[in-house]
Image (spheres, rainbow, N blue to C red):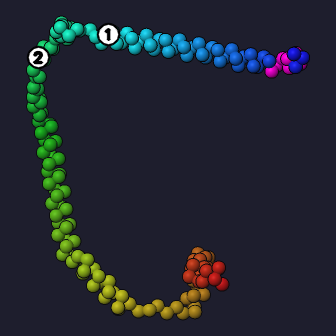
Amino acid sequence: MSWLLDNPQIVIVVALAFASWLKHRSETKKAEAEERRAREEMAEDQDIFGPDQEWRVPQEFSPLPVPPPLARRTPPPLTQFEVSDVEAQLKRQQDIQDRLKKIRETKATTTGGASATRVRVAAAQSHAKPLALSEASLKSSLKDPKQTRRAIILREILNTPLGLR
């Protein structure tokens, strides 16, 4: 008994927990009772008609009347301005199509397709002469700061990696 008087905060916490548990239990019982009543009411509502009664359609659920037919609308006639505008657009589209055809024909005859391009590139590579850099041109190109920077960067890129040196 002396322990209870020495620790009132623990006694209060235990009492609050017990009161909370009692409240929760009573709420649960009330909810179960309401649910049981609701089920009983639904069971009673489902048996509206007995086995000897017939089901009839209530007046409020009678079929809807037939809707009126949809009116067809014809578009208004085009004005002279709109007709000329449409004709101008059609003419412009026809011109564009003609130009596209000419470009395709020209491209087909001049390039000759992918095989002709390969032949031209191979011919250009076979006639190319290797460039020989003279010492004077190298010195003059390194005097330019942009060319010097480019040479250093190319050396770093083309040289062996730092990890392998």
The residue sitting at 15% across, 46% down in the picture is 88
Q: Identity of the amino acid at label 1?
A: Asp
The dominant secondary structure in magenta is helix
Q: Secondary structure at mark 1?
A: helix
Determine which quarter of the picture holds residue 56. top left
Q: Position of residue 108 (x, y in %)?
A: 19, 73
Kindly identify which residue carries mark 1.
Answer: 45
The residue sitting at 19% across, 67% down in the picture is 104
Label 2 crowd (10 A; few <14 / some 14-19 / many >=20): few
- As drawn, 101 above or below 63: below
- Residue 89 drawn in magenta: no
Range of residues picked out in magenta = 4-10
What label does residue 159 carry, if any?
Answer: none
- Left or right? Give the position of 100 relative to 164: left
N-terminal-most mark, 1 or 2: 1
Residue placed most toward the observer, 84 or 72 = 72
Q: Secondary structure at mark 2?
A: loop
Kindly identify which residue carries mark 2.
Answer: 66
Residue 81 visible at all: yes
- Left or right? Give the position of 36 relative to 46: right
Q: Position of residue 64 (x, y in %)?
A: 15, 14
- Residue 8 drawn in magenta: yes
- As drawn, 68 above or below 155: above
Q: Quadrant of the N terminus?
A: top right
- Left or right? Give the position of 78 relative to 25: left
Label 1 crowd (10 A; few <14 / some 14-19 / many >=20): few
Q: CA distance from mark 1 to mark 2?
A: 34 Å
Residue 143 visible at all: no
Q: Position of residue 78 (x, y in %)?
A: 11, 34
Q: Closer to the observer: label 1 or label 2? A: 1
Q: Identity of the amino acid at label 2?
A: Val
